[in-house]
Structures are given as structure tokens and as C-alpha cells.
Amino acid sequence: MEMAKEAFGYMVKYGKSWKAKQAAFDILYGGWEESYNCLAMVLKAMAAENPSVAFKHCRPIMSVDGTFLTGYFKGTLLIIVARNDGGDKLVPLAFTLVSAENNSNWEWFLHVVRIKVIGPQREVCIISDRHPGILNAVEIDIPGHPRVHHRWCMRYFVSKFYQACGDKELSDLLQDCCLTFTTRHFEKLWDKVYAKANNGGKDFLNRNLADKGKWARALDNEGVRYGDMTNNMAKCFNMVLKGICALLVTAIVEYIYISEVECPFSEV
């Protein structure tokens, strides 16, 4: 409407503008139903052009997340992103379109990723939030394939603590506790956080103390997260896709296929 007013000095009604936009969509991408009908052909063409996976050139760390589709047909896009060793750019390794982010879909998706992308020769660390579907999927044993090391996103963990205690200053202190490199410093900060926390905060800390190796860098004894404390890789890529998720499914897939982006967020 604004473009028409600027170009022709006439304010087009909303209904006509919407119809014009839909007509442009049809010209560029085809119809919504047609887009899903073409999806299998598009994916086969991508597979033919990429017979080998890119993950062998990436660090053994994956960031996973889900984001909603906002177009005519709803659903969820699950995506796994890695960081390229050479250019330090983000590489979308695998993605899928599912009806919802639930246990069965995460289990299926991560199973396929472990078989087809990671393979039997490499151990990897997956960093994510604590969605039950992810928590369950990473614990499943696949014969002939190494186990998955799962670590929690620090930002997600601290945000849940803030919901429990409502104290921003104390949440920032817990983040420092997550980031510290030594167990001595961790214990010092932990004691300070625990002493100042209210009952809700103390309950949260008690429930997650046994899993401290999943969220505290100093206690990641295996060093599998290589210092990465968040799933910012996937979050960053989802922000790039924010406007794309309103498009037709073939447009979304093609955009992911050509994308390789730099992540603007620091780990802290």
C-alpha cells in the first residue's frame, strides 16, 4: 500500500493489496498446495547435487532448535546447525518440516541425523534447550553408532532460573557460574547464588545440581562442548529465517539450501 502511494499518489485498499501480494506469490513460487507437491522433487535435486555431507569439515558440535512456520500452512521447522572450521560461518546441516515439536518428531529427526549426517565414526556434542523430545532422543542408543553428548544452552538454563527466583542480579551471577573455567571459582559462585536465592530459586538449583556437568563449563570434564555455552548457532539461523518462514515450503527449503551465515551473537 505504501509503495503504491509513493509511486502513483493513490492509496490502494487493503483487500486489493493483499490480492496483489498473493498473485505475486503465485508468480514467484506457485500455489501453497502446489509447493508441497513439488517438495519431493526439490529435495531429490538437492541430494543429487550434494552426494556427501559437509559435517566432516565442521567442529563436532551441533546446535539444534525449532521454529514455527507462519504461512498459510502451519507447522514447525526443526534444524541442526554447525560451525564451519575454516570460515567460522554457520552451516545448516539438516532440517525437517514437521507438524509439531514433540517427542516422536525429535526422536525421528535426530535418529536420521545420527545415521545419515554424523555417521558411525564420529562423536558429537549437541547443544540445545531442554525440550523433552530432545532430552529423550539424545539418550537413545543406536547400535554401531557412538553416543551423543548432550549439553544445555546456558541462556535457556539461566532464563528458567530467573522464572523461578525473579532476581535479575542473581541470574547474572548464575550465568557467571556457568561460564567460569575452574571448579574452585564455580563452587564459590554457586555458594553465593544458593545463599541469596529464595525458595523457588533454591528448589530449581537443587533439582539441577546433579546435572551440573551439562550446564557448567568448569564441570564439563570431557570438554565436548569446546567452550560453546549456548545454542546461539541455531537461534541465529532461526532469526535469519524469521521472514522466510512465512513463504511457501519450497521457498523455505531453497533458502536454507543456499544459506551460510555469520552469527552476530557472542556466547556471553
Image (spheres, rainbow, N blue to C red):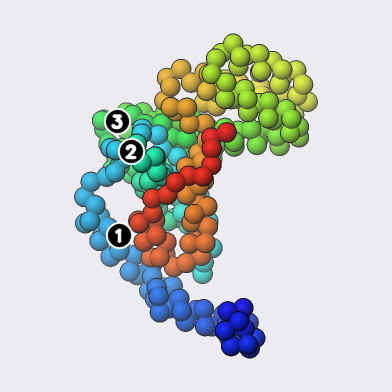
Q: Earlier in the sequence, mark 2 or mark 3?
A: 2
Residue at the spot of label 3: 122
- Using the image as rendered, state which of residue 224 and residue 204 is in the foreground: 224
The residue under label 2 is 86
Q: Secondary structure at mark 3?
A: loop
Residue at (47, 67) in percent of width and height? 247
- 8 relative to 147, above or below: below
Which disc number belongs to residue 43? 1
Q: Position of residue 263 (x, y in %)?
A: 48, 44
Find residue 58 and report its horizontal and vertical position in percent: 33, 37
Q: Secondary structure at mark 2?
A: loop
Which of the 4 image quadrants contains residue 60?
top left
Vertical arrangement, residue 22 with respect to residue 224, above or below: below
**Mark 1 secondary-structure assignment:** helix
Q: Identity of the amino acid at label 3? A: Arg
Q: Is residue 158 left or right of residue 24?
A: right
84 with respect to 45 (left or right)? right
Cα separation, mark 2 vs mark 3, equals 19 Å
Evaluate if marks 2 and 3 touch, with contact meaning CB atoms under 8 Å apart.
Answer: no
Residue nearest the observer in this picture, 130 or 2: 2
What is the x, y in percent for residue 127?
Answer: 47, 35
Q: Residues within 10 Å of mark 3 (few under 14, many from 20)?
A: few
Identity of the amino acid at label 2?
A: Gly
Mark 2 or mark 1: which is in front? 2
